[in-house]
Image (cartoon, helix red, strand yellow):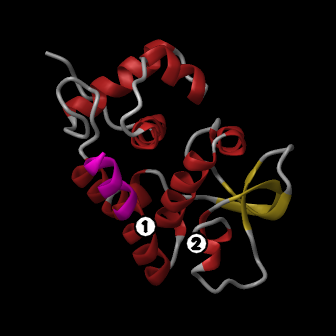
Amino acid sequence: MVKHNGMRPQDIVVLLKMVDYGEEEWLNVDMAKRLGLSPAEVTNVLERCRIARLVSDDKKRVNTVALLDFLQHGLPYVFPAITSAPKRGVLTAVSSEPLASLVAQGKDKYVWPYSKGDARGIAVSPLYPTVPELSQEDSGMHELLSLVDCLRMGRVREKEIAVNLLREKFNTYNNA
């Protein structure tokens, strides 16, 4: 009998990449290379997510209803965002699109620390260490991960907007 041993941050990153891929075919080795993980870790992620009923039994489709429920209600407690002093990095949460144009912001920006980033703001711990670099290379993932960061740290109204935007993206994935 396989044990679950709890969710890990990379599980969320892999699930979001699966949604981002949509109907595009992918292999574990491709996913691993794209996300900066080992192929064995992608296999482990998919098995944990299968046990948690976040992916189908064949591990090729995301259960978006369950994922959205977990992101909305569990993620802020399991993987809270930790902020620190301002740093150079990549914009995230309400400071990044699509939220930046929908939510009124103060002068403070939020960034994932990253030396090659082009913004400066309050540092936010990324969900997984490869997130800032991945976001620089993959705009679809940047958008999804920024919405997830809003769920980790946003205010009630911002979270509602992020949930609605994620729901739209997940519906597109389900209808593809």
Task: Tell me the crowding category of disc 1: few under 14, some 14 to 19, or many 20 or more residues within 10 angstroms, Cα based.
Answer: some
Identified at 49% across, 14% down, the residue is 29
Q: Quadrant of the N terminus?
A: top left
Task: Tell me the crowding category of disc 2: few under 14, some 14 to 19, or many 20 or more residues within 10 angstroms, Cα based.
Answer: many
Q: Is residue 53 left or right of residue 29?
A: left
Q: Considering the whole magenta stretch, tell me its main secondary structure.
A: helix
Q: Which residue is mark 2?
A: 99
Please state which of residues 161 and 124 is positioned toward the viewer in this rendering.
Answer: 161
Is label 2 in contact with label 1 (beta carbons under 8 Å)?
yes
Residue type highlighted by circle 1: Leu
Q: Quadrant of the C terminus?
A: top left
Identified at 39% across, 40% down, the residue is 22
Q: Which residue is mark 1?
A: 165
- Looking at this view, name the residue that lies furthest to the left: 1
Q: Is residue 10 left or right of residue 34?
A: left
Q: Earlier in the sequence, mark 2 or mark 1?
A: 2
Residue 168, position in %: x, y? 36, 63
Q: Specify start and end residues of the magenta stretch as a single range.
A: 168-176
Question: Element type at marker 1?
Answer: helix
Identified at 58% across, 72% down, the residue is 99
Q: CA distance from mark 2 to mark 1?
A: 9 Å
Vertical relation: 158 (above or below) 28: below
Q: Is residue 24 magenta?
A: no
Residue type highlighted by circle 2: Leu
| Quadrant housing residue 110 | bottom right
Question: Element type at marker 2?
Answer: helix
Identified at 76% across, 77% down, the residue is 108
